Image (cartoon, coloured by chain):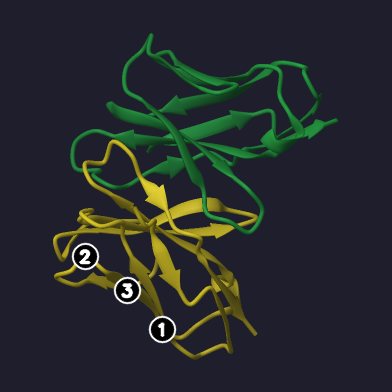
Chain colours: A green, B yellow
Amino acid sequence: EDQVTQSPEALRLQEGESSSLNCSYTVSGLRGLFWYRQDPGKGPEFLFTLYSAGEEKEKERLKATLTKKESFLHITAPKPEDSATYLCAVQAGGTSYGKLTFGQGTILTVHP
Amino acid sequence: KAGVTQTPRYLIKTRGQQVTLSCSPISGHRSVSWYQQTPGQGLQFLFEYFSETQRNKGNFPGRFSGRQFSNSRSEMNVSTLELGDSALYLCASSFNYNEQFFGPGTRLTVL
């Protein structure tokens, strides 16, 4: 069974204080690892998809990296508007098609 | 390019009733997946449709069903509602499974 564990559950940062979120996974043949941002009362917003160990992707203050067992979302010099829940999900190979298995998320709060 | 739309945005039902939720994917996307989100269980996969065929199904009871139309629009139905079905129901569409884009969700409250 595919499993995703995110840590920490919650993270409080001061504006400008860089940090990382962790996503550990077990999956039968990883097809893709997804990162999303979700604001309260809204649907998840797509950020990145990573496909193989060593891959990195960046978007503004966010950088996602992938190893064979985990992924990190690095947040550089965060701003209050980066406050949200960050979700990690895996898609297995084979016949999993559109099925994503999600972690519980990390609630990020950035104080001005 | 318009995003994924879901209707209605909010629903209040009573136990035992049934409900139908609708999802319109991004134009050109033929895959639609449905998820249930609750504070305790997080986001859980319900099922996925591609070209009117259900390709995958999560671990939910048979009360949860869905379908997809020839224009890729999808509906999900929950029969005999239970209190525990209260949740945010999300649909996501994809062109090639490399990116899945979510709609705003339908907030279902069962009283």
What is the distance, in whole Å, between disc 1 and disc 3 at their CAs?
13 Å
Q: Residues within 10 Å of mark 3 (few under 14, many from 20)?
A: many
Residue B56, can we see it? Answer: no
Residue type marked 3: Glu
* For residue A63, above or below residue B103: above
Eye-nearest disc, 2 or 1? 2
Q: Residues within 10 Å of mark 2 (few under 14, many from 20)?
A: many
Task: Residue A76: give its label.
Answer: none
Q: Which residue is mark 1?
A: B79
Chain to which the residue tagged by mark 2 belongs: B
Query: Going from the N terminus, do you reach mark 2 or mark 1 first?
Result: 2
Circles 1 and 3, Cβ within 8 Å, touching? The answer is: no
Left or right: where does residue A78 sit relative to residue B90? right
Q: Which residue is mark 2?
A: B72
Q: Helix, strand or loop at disc 2?
A: loop
Name the image quarter holding residue A108: top right
Q: Residues within 10 Å of mark 1 (few under 14, many from 20)?
A: some
What is the distance, in whole Å, between disc 2 and disc 1 at their CAs?
23 Å
Left or right: where does residue A58 sit relative to residue B73? right
What is the distance, in whole Å, between disc 3 and disc 2 at their CAs?
10 Å
Give percent across and percent down for residue A18: 71, 16
Residue at 36% from the left image edge and 12% from the top image edge: A53
Q: Helix, strand or loop at disc 1?
A: loop
Residue type marked 1: Ser
Chain to which the residue tagged by mark 3 belongs: B
- In the displayed orientation, state which residue is furthest to the front: B1
Q: Which residue is mark 3?
A: B75
* For residue A36, above or below residue A15: below
